[in-house]
Image (cartoon, rainbow, N blue to C red):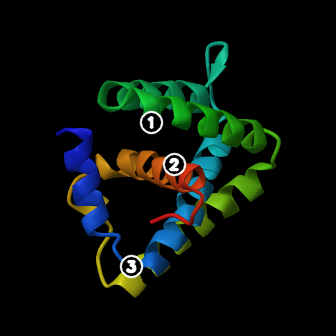
Amino acid sequence: MTKAELFSEYASYHMDPRNRMFHCFGIPLIVLGIMGLLSQIHVGPFDLALVVAVAIIAYYAVIDLGGAALCLVVFAALYLIAVRLPWELNLAAFVGGWVCQLVGHRIEGTKPKFLENLIYLLIGPLYIVEEVFGAIVRGNKPA
């Protein structure tokens, strides 16, 4: 699927502004928590968080080079924060992020899109980063 198709499908499950707001907080918390927890596992000289982040950014680059560049900056910032937090806070961020997601979908009355296709677990961060960055560039709140 193209980025436009993926974003269109994702957006159709995230129409309510309250759900989108919860996702703007929840998705970064999930990414932060995952990075912090995965950074505890080492694969040779690298931690697993870096390996996973590079793979995800590579996927993003295939579907959208600009979005991949934005996500690289955001992921790097989240990684630098996550590796300095104790694992308990990373776990709390991960759980809190999922609570935000579920509350948002409860408000919207839809199920999370990834339940139909796991690729949307990867699309969510790209979508939110582009939505928030686009809103900043436009000088208004996220759509």
Q: Is residue 59 above or below residue 133?
A: above
Q: Which residue is mark 2?
A: 129
Disc on the earlier residue, 2 or 3? 3
Residue 39 in percent (x, y) is at: 67, 34
Mark 1 or 3, nearer chain start: 3
Q: Give coordinates of residue 110: x percent, y percent.
A: 29, 78
* Residue located beneath label 3 in the image: 16
Q: Residues within 10 Å of mark 3 (few under 14, many from 20)?
A: some
| Alpha carbon distance from label 1 to label 2 | 8 Å
User: What amino acid is at disc 3?
Assistant: Asp
Q: Secondary structure at mark 2?
A: helix
Q: In the image, is 84 to the left or to the right of 18?
A: right
Q: Secondary structure at mark 3?
A: loop
Vertical comparison of 48 with 79: above or below? above
Please identify the quadrant where the C terminus is shown. Answer: bottom left
- Measured as percent of width and height from the top left, residue 87 is found at 74, 50
